Image (tube, coloured by chain):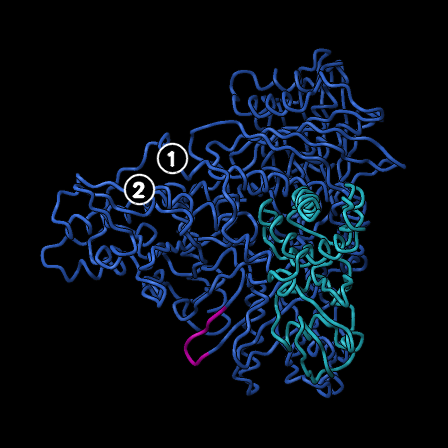
Chain colours: A blue, B cyan
Amino acid sequence: MLHNIDPADLPRALQRLVTHARGTPAALPRRSFLKLAGASGLALGAFPHVALGQTAGAAATTLKPTQQPSAFVQIARNGEVMVTINRLEFGQGVNTGLPMILAEELDADWSLVRSRHGTNDVAYADPLFGIHLTGGSHTIKNSYTQYRELGARARAMLLNAAAAQWKVDVATLRTRAGTVLGPRGLKTGYGELAEAAMALPVPEKVTLKDPKDFRIIGRPTQRLDAQAKTSGKQDFGIDVHLPGQLTAVVARPPVFGSSLALVDDSAARAVKGVKAVLRVPLDGGGEGVAVVAEGYWQATQGRDALKLEWDASKVEKVDSEKQLAQYRELAGQPGPRKLDADMAPLATAPQQIEAEFIFPYLAHAAMEPLNCTVRLGDNRAEIWMGSQSAGLDAAAAAKVLGFTPEQVVVNVLMAGGGFGRRFSSTSDVVVEACAIAKAARTAGLDVPVRTVWSREDDMKGGYYRPMHLHRAKIGFDDKGKVLAWDHVIVAQSILTGTVFAAFQVKDGIDASATEGMLTPYPLPMRLTVHHPKLNVPVLWWRSVGSTHTAFVMETLLDDIARATKQDPVAYRMALFGDSHPRHRAALQLAVDRSGYGKAKLSAGRAWGVAVHESFDSVVAYVVEASIKDGQPVLHRVTSGVHCNLAVNPRSIEAQVQGAAVMGLSTCLPGSAITLKDGIVEQSNFGDFTVARITDMPEFAVHIVPSADPPTGIGEPGLPPLAPAFANAIAQLTGKPLRQLPFNLA
Amino acid sequence: MQLVVNGREHTVDVDPAMPILWALRDTLGLTGTKFGCGAALCGACTVHLDGEAVRSCSTPVSEAVGKKIATIEAVTAGADRVGAAVQAAWIKHDVAQCGYCQSGQIMSATAFIKALPRGKQPTPEEIDTAMAGNICRCGTYARIRAAIADASRSLV
C-alpha cells in the first residue's frame, strides 16, 4: 500500500482531506497537544521553539515538529528514557524498533528505555509523507533517519548541558550508556542533566554514528512490551475505561448501505442496563441502530431484543457466484492497459499456457474486534483507539462532530492486530463511534461512549481484501524464454474514491491492484485491468496487491520451468541475471539453508519455491509440503530475507513467521468471504478459517546481512508463502493450483 | 451473586446468564481476559474454573458460583508456580506480537501443563492438540510451541 507514492504528493493529499473534512481551506494543526512535563520526568528540550524565541539573539529554529526531540523523548530524573512512537503498535514491533534506533544515537542505557504511543499531533506524522500513517511497512524505513537524528540531537543537548555545568569544552566529553563522561573522572547520568538540557537550543545539524559502532541497532532485542503482554497488564483500545463510560453496539444492515424501514425498540429499551437506543447514520449511506448500555453484554442483549425491518431496495445485492460470472465476462473485454508489450509472438509461440486464477474476498479478522471510545465536550472531543491513521481519523471525526480537526485529540492505543483494517479511507469506525457519542449526548447521556464491534459485526461489516480474477495467456520457447504474456486482472479498485485516488489511480488503473506484477522479471507483458464497481466495501489487507500478484507470478513461472524441464531456482536465477542482487541473495540463502536440491526429502514430500519483492524488501521461501487425506500440508519453511539493515533481527523473525502464517491462512479451506443475496455468508472463526497452531510448519528465518538503510518487513513475508506451498503441491500432483484457498478437485 | 475471582470474593449484581467474560471485564474491571469471538472459537477469553481452562465468553456466571475463577492477572502474579514458568518462557521466547490473544494462550498452556502427569514432557503433537483452540492472528505459533516445551522442562 502506498509504497510507490511519491512522498511529495502526500502532504497535498492530507491538505485536500482536511479541507474536505472541514468544508473550508485549513492549515495543518500547529499547536502541540502534548503535555510534556509530566510527573514522571521532564521533557528534554520541551518547547524549544518557545525557549529560543525568548532568548535574545537566538535564531529561530527551522526544524519541523517531526525533527524536535521534545515530542519524542523524555528523560526522568532516575534516568528512564521514554520514547514516543509516531505509529500504531499492533504487533509489528515498532514500539521496540523505533526506541532502539533513537537509543542508539542517544547512547542510552537500553535497560532504562520505555516506549509509549503518540496522538494525532502533527509531530507524529510520517516524516516523509506528512500524514499520520502506519502502513505499507513504512515505519522503520521512513523513520530510521528521523529517530537517529532525534536521539543524536537529544544527546548533543545533554552533552552541552554537562559542558556548561562542568565548565569544560564539550569536545572533551563523551557518553556511555546513559552517562556523560568528562575529564578528571567527571561523570553524571542523563537523568541528572535532563532538566538543564531541556532549556538549551536544539541543534539543527548532528553527526550520526558510523553503523560499525552500533551497539543496540542490529542486536536481537526483546520487545519492550513482553512483560505487559504476558501478565494481562497491557491495555488495548477495547480496555479503555473512563468514569461513567457506557458501551454501544450497533445493529447493522445485513446488506451494505441499506436503510431502516421499521424500528421497534420497546423490548430493547426494557432490557436491564440499556440506557438509550439511537438511530444512527452508518458508513456507505446506510443506517443502523445503536444500543447504549452499562456494558457490552447488556448492549448486545438490548440489540438482540430489537425488532428491525430493513429496506435494501435501493442498494445492489452482490452474489459471489454471479459476480464470478460477471468477472469472467469482463476479462474478455478490452480495457485500460498498465503494460502494453507486443502480443504478436503469442500466436506462433512453441509452447503456451492459459490460466485463470480466482481469489476471494478476505476479512482482516484481527483478534481485537474494532472499537473506538469517544468523550465529547462542548468544543472538544477526545478519542481513544488503535488507529493506523490518527490525523485522518481526527479530521473525519471533526467533520461528523462539527468541530475543526484542532478540537479533536486522538489518543493512539495498542491494538490487537489490524492488518490494514484500522485505517479505512472513510474512517468508518471513528465516524460511527462519533455519530453515536453525539446522538447519546443529544439524548442526555453526557458520558464517554465506547463503541464495540462483535466478531460477527467485524466479519460481516465490510472492508475486505477484494475478490480478484486473473487470466494469463503465455507463449514461450522450449528453453522457457517468454515470448509474450497477455494478462488480465479484474477486481474492485481499493483506492478509487479515496483521497489517494488522485495519484494512485491513473488512466483508470488502481496501482494497488497491479503492484507485484512483473517486477523484477524482464518479461514482455500486456496487462489489462478492469475495475468493476460493486456494493462491497474493499480495503488494503496485509501486503495489498501482492496477496494475489505474487501467487500468480510465482506459480506461473514454476509452470514454465516445469514445462521446459528446468529447475525452478535456476530458472528464476537466470531471469534475475545480474540486475537483481537482493533477489538472488535472498533466494540463494533460502536454498542453502533448506538443503534444497541436496537433502533427501521424506517420502511423499516435495519442494516448493517462491520469491517476491514487496515494500522494498525481498523474501524467498523454500518449503516442503505433502498431501494428506486429500489436503495439502505444509511441513517446513526456510526463508531468505533481504530487508537491508536488520534493526531488530528477533522482530524480523517474528514478522516473517507471522506474515507467512497469514499467507498460509489464505490457502486453507474456508478462508474466503462470500456473499449470497447481498449478505456476507461468514460470521465468525467457525466459518472463516484462519491458521491454527496445528497448521504451523517448522519455520526458519535467515536474514541476508546488509548495512544499507532498512526497508519494510511487516508485510513482505506474506506474498511468497502461498505460491511456494502451491508450487510444492503442483510438483506432487503435476497440476498447478489456480485458486486461493487451495482447491485440489 | 457471589463469585470467587483470583482468591477474592465479589458480590455482583448481574444477569446469571451473563458470560463470565463480561462480569470480569465490565463489572470487576479485570481486562486482562480478552474478548475475541464471543462463541468459544478463538480462546482469547480463556480463564480457569476450578483449575480447568474454560472459554469465559460462553460460560455464564451462574456456572461459576461455588467455584474458583482464576484469570491471567493472578496466574502470572508469581505465586502460581506453573503460571510463572509459562510466563517466563513466554518472555524468554518473545512470543507476543500484538499480544491480544496471549492471555488466553498462557491460560490454556498453563492448564495443559498442570494436567500433565508429574515429570511428563509433552510431545509436539500433544502441545498442538492442547493449543488448537487458541487462535493467534499474528502467527506466533512457532514461539508458543517452543515456550511450552521450555516451560515444561523448567518445571521438572
From this viewpoint, which residue is outermost toward the top? A479
User: Quick one: quadrant of the N terminus of chain B?
Assistant: bottom right
Is A551 situated left or right of A190 in this image?
A: right
| Span of residues in magenta | A377-383
Query: Residue A22 at what x, y percent from top left?
Result: 43, 67
Q: Is residue A283 above or below residue B3?
A: above
Residue type pointed to by label 2: Arg
Query: Badge 2 sits on which subunit?
Result: A
Callout 1: SS: loop
In-front residue for pair A111/A562: A111
Packing grade of label 1 (10 A; few <14, some 14-19, many >=20) is some
Residue A509 position by quadrant: top right
Residue, disc 1: A214
Query: Residue A272 at what x, y percent from top left?
Result: 71, 86
In-front residue for pair A7/A613: A613
Residue, disc 2: A176
